[in-house]
Image (cartoon, rainbow, N blue to C red):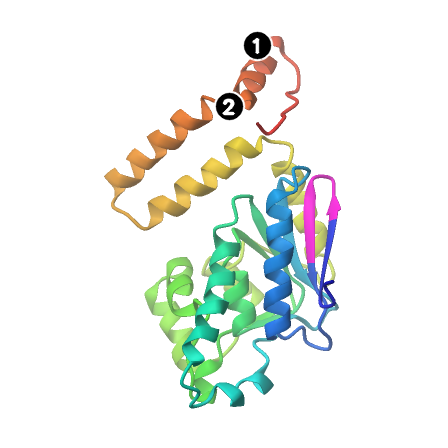
Amino acid sequence: MRLLVKVEVENRLGIVTIQNPPLNVMSKQVIEELDQAFQELETNEEVVAVLLTGQGQKAFVAGADIKEFPQLMGHPHARASFEETHAVLNRIDDFRKPTIVALNGMAFGGGLELALTCDMRIAEEHALLCVPEVKLGLFPGAGGTQRLPRVVGEAKAKEMMYTGEPITAEEALRVGLVNYVVGTGEAVDKAKALASKITRHSLQSLSRIKKAVDDGLGVPLKEGLQREVELFEEVFQTDDIKEGVSAFIEKRQPVFSHK
């Protein structure tokens, strides 16, 4: 039974809400429950996309639970705990369905690292985004040193990590860290509106778009193009392409089976 992460399904959209007041810190339990939630939504045939957000208006996720850190200091097997966190975030990053995160407040440390595993980010105007670990004698260790530079570029990522200072939602928009900035309390509605434009389409297509982009980012262009050809061949074997083409010819809306 999940206590800190709620899952709902609405109009083919899975909605995952972190509920760990007052600041939705990313404790070990939250990480475990997030993993369970995404695994359930992965196999739920009704769900085409997923929205991730936090409860309240103060924070999406205000970082890791610092109270759990002392037990890891000097621990000979601390690496196993770090690798477990990485494994969960990697699974969310590799989730085959489109993902949108609604940043309803601060996204600090592990919160920003979690947001970076999603495909698209929507921030409310009061949200602050930050990787402040250096102020504790640490550095972003849940994927931040790798995912953040890939989104905002090396120089900006290093500035954020070296200083530990937050950036506003508007600056995050300028550097490409978020897709949209909306008013306070509006991020979830904006995410649902965006999702409605996505979930009407075939999951067979959407999942391969995501795979082609993600796989291609880590390899030279020619290898990425070859991967695109492989995935394009795959999508031509699906039932959904038959429905999509038939609907176009017949001048009607397609009804995708997602098969």
Residue at 26%, 42% in the rendered image: 221
Could you tell me residue 48's position as x and y percent?
A: 62, 39
Q: Give the range drawn in magenta.
A: 9-16
Quadrant of the rendering where the C terminus is positioned = top right
Q: Earlier in the sequence, mark 2 or mark 1?
A: 2
Tell me the crowding category of disc 2: few under 14, some 14 to 19, or many 20 or more residues within 10 angstroms, Cα based. some
Disc 1 marks which amino acid? Answer: Ile
Could you tell me residue 214's position as x and y percent?
A: 40, 47
Let me know if residue 130 appears in the view: yes
Q: Mark 2 points at which residue?
A: 238
- Residue 159 lies, with reference to residue 182, above or below; the image says below
Quadrant of the rendering where the N terminus is positioned = bottom right
- Residue 256 lies, with reference to residue 21, above or below; the image says above
Say whether marks 2 and 1 touch (CB < 8 Å). Answer: no
Q: Name the residue under label 1.
A: 249
Find residue 56 and report its image quarter.
Answer: bottom right
Tell me the crowding category of disc 1: few under 14, some 14 to 19, or many 20 or more residues within 10 angstroms, Cα based. few
**SS at mark 2?**
loop
